[in-house]
Each structure stands twice: as structure tokens, then as C-alpha cells.
Image: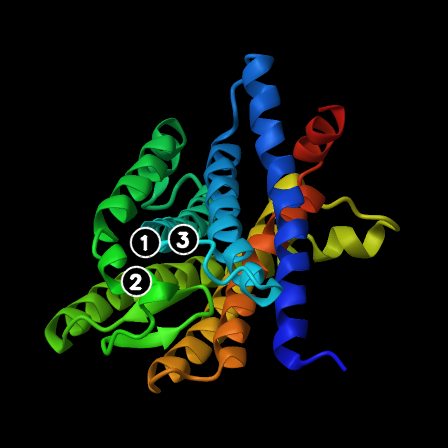
């Protein structure tokens, strides 16, 4: 009978493969646009950065996790573990920031032109790539300390090892450093989640007002047409909501596992599975909602 740990590992492996296909399709659209010398829309520029971050998250988080159950416990040395965890944390943080930017940009774009955000609404599309690049730089610099908190599986006998991940080990540095890292990482996450909730609330209000305005038209037409703006807003609202849900569940499992020394492996694997759900599902949601991207990916 298959154990629960092995079932979770197989699910993570399938999840990684499916997610890689979806994100590769989005990146293919970007490459095709460059070859055709087409200018990407602001929303597509954000999506490309999100697809790249999701790809790195799945590569650095899913593949090493599934190698250990197949007997490859020492396929990563100490340097390999540090690099894998560093880029996984950078990619995950950038996925958080980019999703926050995606929701904020869409919430800003649907606001009326006579609002107080009108000036920012017209200027933001021209400079949308700058915050995406700054997000990568911020997380590359802000996660410098992550390699210090990870060691190879061969050093598992070290007394400072806090968490055995099956292929690498989580190291406890000292109470002060751990507290500072927790405060910094948590503050960034809370700020981004707060902005996501604000953006989601704005989009919900927009959709409700839009429904009220066209209620008469919908009652007189047999097959009312949904505008592209409304369709994009609904998709991004679902995308942001999915991120908040999966992030909250993954953080709850991770926090619970962090309270114990060497917690059970199923608890750690469940946290990884939940954290990888968003990078796996998001590209397919975007491909389904945007017919322009879907057609370009099919032609590629």
C-alpha cells in the first residue's frame, strides 16, 4: 500500500510537470512576441514576470523534493542546497510581489478617468516594467541570508539542524537573527497581502457596479456580451484570491512545522504542495481568460 508521504511526493511531481507546461506556454508567448517585434501590453509584461517566477518556484521547490523518495538523498551538496533554497525563496517572493502588482494594476486600470487616481492610471502602463525589475532586485538582495539557514543533508548530524527536509536541512542560526529574518519576511508578505485584499475589494466593487449599470441591457438581450475588461477583471480577481488562499494554507502548515524540532515529513510536504498549487494553476487560468495569449501560444 502506498504511504501518505509517497503519495504527496508523487502529487508534487505531477504538479511540477503540469505547472512547467503551463508556465512554458506563457513564456512561449513572450518569445514569439519578441520574434515578431510586437509590443507587449502592460498586463502581459506583468504576466511574463509572473510566469518566470512560477517556473523557478516549481523547479527549485518541486523537483528536489521529489528526488529524495527515489533514493537520491545526497544529489545536492551543501552549495547546491544553498542555491536551490535561495532561488526558490527569491522566486516565491517575486511571485508574491508580481501577483500583488497584477491585482493593483488591474484595479487601477478599471477606475474612472475622473477619479483621483487618473494621473497614475495613465502613467503606469508606460513604466510597468520598472517595478517588475525592481521586485527581482529587491528579493535577490533581501534573501542573501537564506543560504546561511540551509545546509546539505550530509551535515544532518549537526546540532544546529532545525528541520530535516529529506534532501537538505534547515539550520537554526541564533534567536536574534531568526527573529529579524522572520519580522522582515513577514512584513513584506503582510504588506503585499494587504494590497491584494485592497485590490480585490476594488475589483469586486467595480464588478458589482458594472452589473447594476447593465442590468437592464442584460434583461432585454438573450445573450449579453461580456466586455474584455470585465472578463480580465474577473480572472485576475480569481487569480489574486487563489494566491491568498493557498498562501494562507501553506503558511499555516509551515508555521506549525516550525514550532517543532524535526517535524514529520508529511507536514513539510503538505506545505510544499499547497505552496506549489498557485504556480501550477495560475498559467492555465490566464491562458483560459485571455484569448489573445491563447491564440499566440497555439501558433507557437
Q: Quadrant of the N terminus?
A: bottom right
The crowding category of the residue bearing disc 1, from other C-alpha atoms within 10 Å (few below 14, some 14 to 19, many at least 20), is many
Residue 169, quarter of the rendered image: bottom left
Cα gap from disc 2 to disc 1, whole angstroms: 6 Å
Relative vertical location of residue 84 with respect to residue 251 in this rendering, above or below: above
For the question of whether residue 81 can be seen, the reply is yes
Residue in front for this viewpoint, 209 or 149: 149
For the question of whether residue 204 can be seen, the reply is no
Q: Residue at x 41, y 76 (%)?
A: 254
**Which badge, 3 or 2, is on the more N-terminal residue?**
3
- Checking the image for residue 82, the label placed there is 1
Residue in front for this viewpoint, 211 or 288: 288
Residue in front for this viewpoint, 147 or 257: 147
Cα gap from disc 3 to disc 2, whole angstroms: 12 Å
Instruction: Name the secondary structure under disc 1.
Output: helix
Which residue corresponds to mark 2? 150
Relative vertical location of residue 209 with respect to residue 109 in this rendering, above or below: below
Q: Residue at x 14, y 77 (%)?
A: 175
Report the colour scheme: rainbow
Tell whether label 1 touches label 2 (CB within 8 Å).
yes
Q: Is residue 169 left or right of residue 211?
A: left
Q: Residue furthest left?
A: 176
- Checking the image for residue 88, the label placed there is 3
Q: Residue at x 81, y 57 (%)?
A: 219
Amino acid at each position: 500500500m502506498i504511504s501518505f508521504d509517497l503519495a504527496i511526493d508523487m502529487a508534487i511531481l505531477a504538479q511540477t510537470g503540469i505547472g512547467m507546461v503551463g508556465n512554458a506556454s506563457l513564456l512561449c508567448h513572450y518569445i514569439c512576441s519578441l520574434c515578431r517585434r510586437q509590443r507587449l501590453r502592460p498586463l502581459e509584461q506583468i504576466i511574463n514576470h509572473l510566469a518566470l517566477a512560477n517556473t523557478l518556484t516549481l523547479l527549485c521547490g518541486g523537483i528536489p523534493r521529489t528526488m529524495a523518495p527515489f533514493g537520491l538523498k545526497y544529489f545536492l551538496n551543501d552549495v547546491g542546497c544553498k542555491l536551490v533554497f535561495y532561488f526558490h525563496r527569491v522566486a516565491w517572493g517575486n511571485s508574491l510581489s508580481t501577483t500583488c502588482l497584477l491585482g493593483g494594476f488591474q484595479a487601477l486600470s478599471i477606475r474612472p478617468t475622473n477619479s483621483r487616481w487618473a494621473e497614475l492610471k495613465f502613467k503606469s502602463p508606460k513604466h510597468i516594467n520598472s517595478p517588475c525589475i525592481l521586485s527581482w532586485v529587491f528579493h535577490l538582495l533581501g534573501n542573501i541570508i537564506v543560504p546561511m539557514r540551509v545546509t546539505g543533508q550530509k551535515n544532518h548530524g549537526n546540532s544546529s539542524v532545525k528541520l530535516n527536509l529529506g534532501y537538505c536541512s534547515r539550520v537554526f542560526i541564533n534567536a536574534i537573527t531568526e527573529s529579524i529574518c522572520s519580522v522582515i519576511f513577514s512584513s513584506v508578505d503582510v504588506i503585499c497581502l494587504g494590497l491584494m485584499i485592497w485590490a480585490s475589494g476594488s475589483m469586486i466593487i467595480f464588478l458589482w457596479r458594472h452589473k447594476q449599470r447593465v442590468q437592464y441591457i442584460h434583461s432585454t438581450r438573450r445573450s449579453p456580451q461580456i466586455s474584455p475588461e470585465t472578463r480580465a477583471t474577473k480572472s485576475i480577481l480569481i487569480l489574486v484570491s487563489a494566491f491568498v488562499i493557498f498562501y494562507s494554507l501553506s503558511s499555516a502548515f509551515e508555521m506549525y512545522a516550525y514550532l517543532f524540532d524535526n517535524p514529520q515529513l508529511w507536514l513539510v510536504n503538505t506545505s510544499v504542495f499547497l505552496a506549489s498549487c498557485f504556480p501550477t494553476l495560475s498559467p492555465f487560468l490566464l491562458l483560459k481568460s485571455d484569448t489573445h495569449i491563447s491564440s499566440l501560444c497555439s501558433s507557437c
